[in-house]
Image: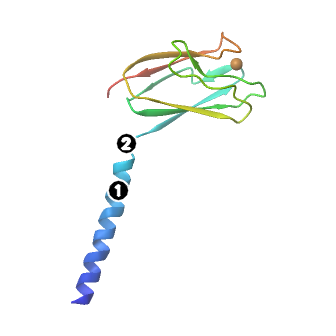
Amino acid sequence: MTRLVELAGLSLIGWLAATAPLAVAAQSTVTVDIKSFAFAPKDVTVAPGTRIVWTNRDDTPHTVTATDRTFASPGLDTGDTFEHTFTAAGDFSYICTVHPYMGGVVHVRKP
Ligand SMILES: [Cu+2]
């Protein structure tokens, strides 16, 4: 009988392990590199709730600054990252304030 309870306990743990990651996997992450004075990729299309992580791969400081200022990074040195989670659908353009010719767009679309 004890053996049966142990087996039941193990299967419950297995069930929790199998289902718990699904519950926390709702937020996905997309990465954008900042390199050679450009955002790569320049355009990304994501679902609402997606987190975007930008990483500066240049030896020059850059920023990630929304043109409507809804998000704005500090100056990012080499290897620094900035992240923003997009909750609402829409098109969100951004630039680097140090080099305003550097631009990118995040398209947030419901799947
Ligand atoms: Cu820049």
Q: Position of residue 22 (x, y in %)?
A: 35, 51
Looking at the image, do the residues carrying marks 2 and 1 touch, with CB atoms under 8 Å apart?
Answer: no
Give residue 20's mark.
1
Q: Is residue 40 above or below residue 98?
A: below
Q: Residue at x 23, y 84 (%)?
A: 4
The reply, left or right, for residue 89 in relation to residue 29 is: left
In depth, the one of 44 and 83 nearer the eye is: 83
Residue 46 in picture, x, y percent from top left:
42, 28
* Up/down of 54 relative to 10, above or below: above
Question: x, y (%) of residue 111?
Answer: 32, 28
Rendered position, 14 above or below 56: below
Of residues 104 and 84, the one drawn nearer to the viewer in this rendering: 84
Name the side, left or right, on which 32 lies relative to 3.
Answer: right
Q: Which residue is mark 2?
A: 26
**What's the residue at 40%, 33% (across, down)?**
49
Q: How is the image coloured?
A: rainbow
Mark-to-mark CA distance, 2 and 1: 11 Å
The amino acid marked with disc number 1 is Ala
Three-letter code for the amino acid on which mark 2 is drawn? Ala
User: How many other residues sit within 10 Å of disc 2, few (<14), some (14-19) or many (≥20)?
Assistant: few
Q: Quadrant of residue 50?
A: top left
Q: Give the quarter of the figure containing the N terminus.
A: bottom left
At horizontal 77% and vertical 24% (from top left) the residue drawn is: 60
